[in-house]
Image (tube, rainbow, N blue to C red):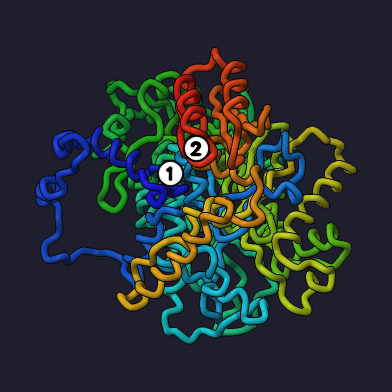
Amino acid sequence: MSKKDITNSPKIQETELENLKTLFPQFFSEWNFDIDGFKSYLEWQTADNNEFYRFEWTGKKNAKQIASKPTKNTLIPDIQNSKNWDTTQNLFIEWDNLEVLKLLLNKYYGQIKMIYIDPPYNKDKDFVYKDTWKDNLVDYLAQTWQVDEDGETTTEKETTGRKHSNWLNMIYPRLILARKLLKEDWVIFVSIDDDEVHNLRKVMDEVFWPDNFIAQIIVKNNPGWRDYGGIALTHEYAIVYSKNIETELNLIEDKNKKFPFKDEKWDFELRELRNRNIKFNNLNRPNLYYPFYININNIDEFWLYEISLENKPWFIELFPLESQWIKTVWRWGKDKVLKNLNLEIKWKLKNDWGYMIVEKYRSNLSRERSIFDEKDVRWEYWTLSVKNLFWKNTPFDYPKSDRLIYRFLNLWLSNNDIILDFFAGSWTTAHAVIDLNKDWWNRKFICVQLPEKVAKNSEAEKAWYKTISEITRERIKRAWEKIKSEEGWENVDIWFRAFKLAESNFKYLSEKYEIKTWLSEEENKIQMQILEENMKKEVEETWLIDWRTENDVVYELIIREWYSFYSSVEKLENGIYKVSDENKYFYALIQEKISEEDIRKFVKNHLNEKQVRFFALEESLSESARATLDTYFILQNI
């Protein structure tokens, strides 16, 4: 493979082709996919004349291409802004989340249990994220209007007439990449308001599939209302999707719950045994569609009647009721019913002379409701909370309530699960994870945030903060001090390894040396002249991007080779690094020159290690040294 063909993106497409080959082996010849044959196979269910329901907007095709474009960027460790580097299992990453998501795929493909994001709401200003197929990290800040010619943060008015398209072009590729990160049993929550909720639902239907929609939660976060427009707004939304509609989110404890009935066993309330969701019916759940038989002559003190699964004389047959002309089903199968027949389930006559099979429900656990209107989800409540952390001067205008995110996390996360938030903002998600880990479980967070400048004359600027990222790190530090002083649980992992997105450490991956295929013929001539000059200089210069360290290079190899971000890095004799991740490891020679004697000593000390990879610069090894290493290791060029 040519150096110019190398990227830091994982081979996700190969993995997806393997999955496709497993499902449809008849359309593969070796690794060649017969796309025409596959189209013919699907022809019977393909709409005629392209007339079918779909969601389109200006730039959609380009946005999808951006999601699949390989990245040549990397993440470099930011040890100065990290805390507990050697022991923490949390990550905080700065810069553009689109590129970061591509790099996270290397290690976290199919490993994230839950995603929560609070993306920009696309208010009265044109959206700042403007990804293009040809953009790279060098012109990212200027492209997104984050800085002007003086390096100051800018905000541009909506002038393009494509406000919604721009927002969709931002969120679409990020959701596509996020979907690849999710585990088999995933859940995603997205906060949004009225400006884009309709578009968000449609684009999430496309990425996550409409059948996987769970709820559109109403969050009453501003009961004092925004007093403008035709109707005073008091709420936002949280859109929820999961692996499938049958996903059972965790139940919520109601400590103040009162039960209306009590028998010899315990308190209880009555719940209908019929499943009211018409998505579950006699066609797709035939095992749950069966009759009960009711004895109307046998009634107990709670006015509940005897039931049976067998038809007996004078018993009345009862199937689940129909709803919208669809035959619904029971929630329990026959085996479970037989174990609880006339003990925990009976027949009840309703006040309107209707009837239903009921369960004696004894738990104080219940499903989360679709309206959150408690005080602790409100803006002002958590503005005060953040003020308490920052000495009464909050650097955030409208911080999300960490109790709101806490409730989301509590619905799904378990021990050692990972949550990803790639619009981390004020770091509410990290704060909520820390709070949730009071139960001594070890949930982990990955947070991604642009190093966005704080607004001029804001409370944050007055407090000498330059970027949102600085504030978020300070928030976690202060939250920890508060928790430690009040509750004394020093062993909980609340800290993080910090990384920053950057161009590759290697000059051959730098955009400066790359042919820009989208340029015109005349522009390409000029570019080729510049490229030749750069290549001539390269002979006299180091192979490494200026100011980068050996440690930066090691972590680029870690990312490229799908190793963990928490891999152990050890510098051995003669400047050779050993990188270990659980039961696998590799060696890397970062320096430009090494003597043959040093190579022989290294090999002598590691003779028992077979089939271990050794990375080195092509120019750093003599032919003899290369032959020696190649005899005992799997030698690969960096």
Q: Compare residues 370 and 347 and report the one nearer the observer.
A: 370
Instruction: Report x, y in % for residue 451.
Output: 66, 63
The kind of residue on which mark 2 rests is Trp
Image vertical order of residue 295 relative to residue 64, above or below: above
Residue drawn at x 54%, y 39% is 620
Whether residue 202 is visible: no
Q: Which quarter of the figure is the N terminus placed in?
A: top left
Instruction: Report x, y in % for residue 8.
Output: 47, 47
CA–CA distance in space, label 1 to label 2? 8 Å
Q: Is residue 591 left or right of residue 307?
A: right
- Numbered label attached to residue 562: 2
> How many labels sit on residues?
2
Residue drawn at x 61%, y 33% is 567
The kind of residue on which mark 1 rests is Pro
| Label 1 or label 2, whichever comes before in sequence order | 1
Image vertical order of residue 151 relative to residue 412, above or below: below
Instruction: Report x, y in % for residue 539.
Output: 51, 55
Circle 1 packing at 10 Å, graded few (<14), some (14-19), many (20+), is many
The residue pinned by badge 1 equals: 10
Image vertical order of residue 321 relative to residue 303, above or below: below
Question: Residues at badges 1 and 2 in contact (C-beta under 8 Å)?
Answer: yes
Whether residue 283 is visible: yes
Residue 155's image quarter?
A: bottom right
